[in-house]
Amino acid sequence: MSTTPVQSPDPAAPGGPGPTDDAVPGLERRWTRRRVLAWGVGAGAAITAAGVAGVELVSSGVLSPRQVLLRMEGACDVAPPVLDVGALGPATSGRFFSRARRQVVGYTIAYPPGHGPGSVLPLVVMLHGYGANHTNALSGLSPVQALALRVGGRPLLPMAMVTVDGGGGYWHPHPGDDPLGMVVDELVPMCRTRGLGRPAQGLATMGISMGGYGALLVAERYPAMVEAVAAISPAVWTTYAEAHGANPGAYSSAEDFAANDVVTRAAALGGIAVRLASGQSDPFHPGVKVLASELPHAAVDFSKGCHTGSFFLAQEPPSLAFLSDHLR
């Protein structure tokens, strides 16, 4: 067993959250390089002081100007957690043709220490964020490391974890690409044939950013299947205008947004254990607060932080412990 301080990944690095997930909804796509350089003496000088890389990240849309300032002011500083990781279990990866997504998708199934293929276990379906895939659904941890964590001195309940390629469509159906159907009708049944996530053992959903939204969406649509959900910094908007301004590809229309809005359908989570975590300086925080107001039974952690890898990593251990406590 090792106690290891983990360095948080750079959210702007390859495999980190995509541009949309770190942008102020409805704002970032209107900030051009010319506007950044003409922004003004105060804020503009602050970004310039951060270096050329800061200006490039703003002009490319990876960071909004407000997020750059928040980072410089320390609002995004979250201490990397000291992780207590035991001996690792095995993992297996593969690919299958998804009829729902009309393409081949990759997946990884990870097992806890002392277990492996053939074990009958509860299952966590871990959904990745925008720009990621099944290989980097977690922030700063591999699935086998996550399952080997000891949180507060206690090991997690033995449970498996599966990750899968969901694309960039926010985990809801699009014409010719239905990641939600892929998860529910293909991925989960495949796992259940392997003894994972059967009704007698229990199934939970978890995700970060776009994946946090997806974890909530799966639970709302299929409450009889999901016992618990943990959403870290979920990419939640409260209006179609916000969503379209931040990522025009997330929803095809106002009707599409309404059909897949997790806030207005939060009552479907009434019988499910829910944990919500969001940084107080996260651009999605206003929407998450509205969602939390609709879920008085939810465990909520609103603390210092932004939409960054350091916040995601800090929230992974308590989120996994929450799921461990609420699965059979």
Image (cartoon, rainbow, N blue to C red):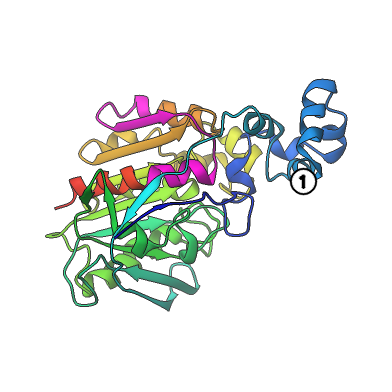
Position of 264 relative to 107 (above/below): above
Residue nearest the viewer, comparing 81 with 223: 81
Residue 28 higher or lower than 153, as above or below: above
Quadrant holding the N terminus: bottom left
Camera-side residue: 124 or 42? 42
Direction from residue 250 to residue 268 in the image, left or right: left
Q: Which residue is mark 1?
A: 53
The three-letter code of the residue at mark 1 reads Ala
Q: Residues within 10 Å of mark 1 (few under 14, many from 20)?
A: few
Say if 107 sits above or below 1 in the image. below
Q: Is residue 299 magenta?
A: yes
The answer, for residue 217, to whether it is visible in the render is no
Q: How many numbered circles does the render carry?
A: 1
Left or right of residue 220: residue 18? right
User: Is any atom of residue 135 visible in this view?
Assistant: yes
Looking at the picture, how far across and down is residue 14, in whole percent? 62, 59
Magenta part of the protein: which range? 292-316
Residue 293 percent location from the top left of the image: 36, 24
Q: How far from the left and from the top, in percent, is residue 176? A: 53, 65
Relative to 277, residue 192 above or below? below
Q: Give the quarter of the image for residue 245.
A: top right
Q: Along the line of sight, which residue is nearer the eye, 156 or 279?
A: 156
Residue 93: percent from left, percent from top: 40, 76
27 is within the stretch colored magenta: no
